[in-house]
Image: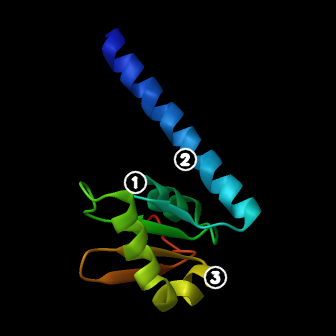
Amino acid sequence: MDKRRYVQTRRAETAQRTRERILDAARRAGRVVVSADADFGDILARTNAERPSVIFLRRQQGRRAAEVAALIIANLDAVADDLLGGAIVVIHDERIRVRSLPMNLTDD
């Protein structure tokens, strides 16, 4: 067995468990997860979860933390009710998309 592949797979599995623990902690504490990692949305979709809400930041590489925080704050009023109700909010530079939770995806 190629040890490099095993280590990469193991790291991916560890990262997946870490994301699930983050989501679980946010759900229990009534918090919103803010991330640039799309895997959080994938987990919520796969598990058909109603909470926690996630703010997903797209194309924000190279921005300073203060700039990203200002972007979130500038858009928070527009999505506050969605976040309280359970949603994935995707913030781009020029637009916002909201997807309510649970996603109710089926395996057709």
Q: CA distance from mark 3 to mark 1?
A: 21 Å
Q: CA distance from mark 2 to mark 1?
A: 9 Å
Residue in the picture at 37% in, 24% down: 8
Q: Are marks 2 and 1 in contact (CB under 8 Å)?
A: yes
Badge 3 or badge 1: first in the primary sequence: 1
Residue in the picture at 34% in, 67% down: 67
Tell me, for residue 68, which label it has, or none.
none
- Image coords of residue 105 (percent x, y): 48, 71
Instruction: Look at the picture and state if 96 lies above or below 11.
Output: below
- For disc 3, the neighbor class at 10 Å (few under 14, some 14 to 19, many from 20) is some
Residue 63 found in image quarter: bottom left
Q: Which residue is mark 1?
A: 37
Query: In which quadrant is the C terminus drawn?
Result: bottom left
- Image coords of residue 86 (percent x, y): 60, 78
Q: Which residue is mark 3?
A: 84
Q: Secondary structure at mark 2?
A: helix
Q: Secondary structure at mark 3?
A: helix
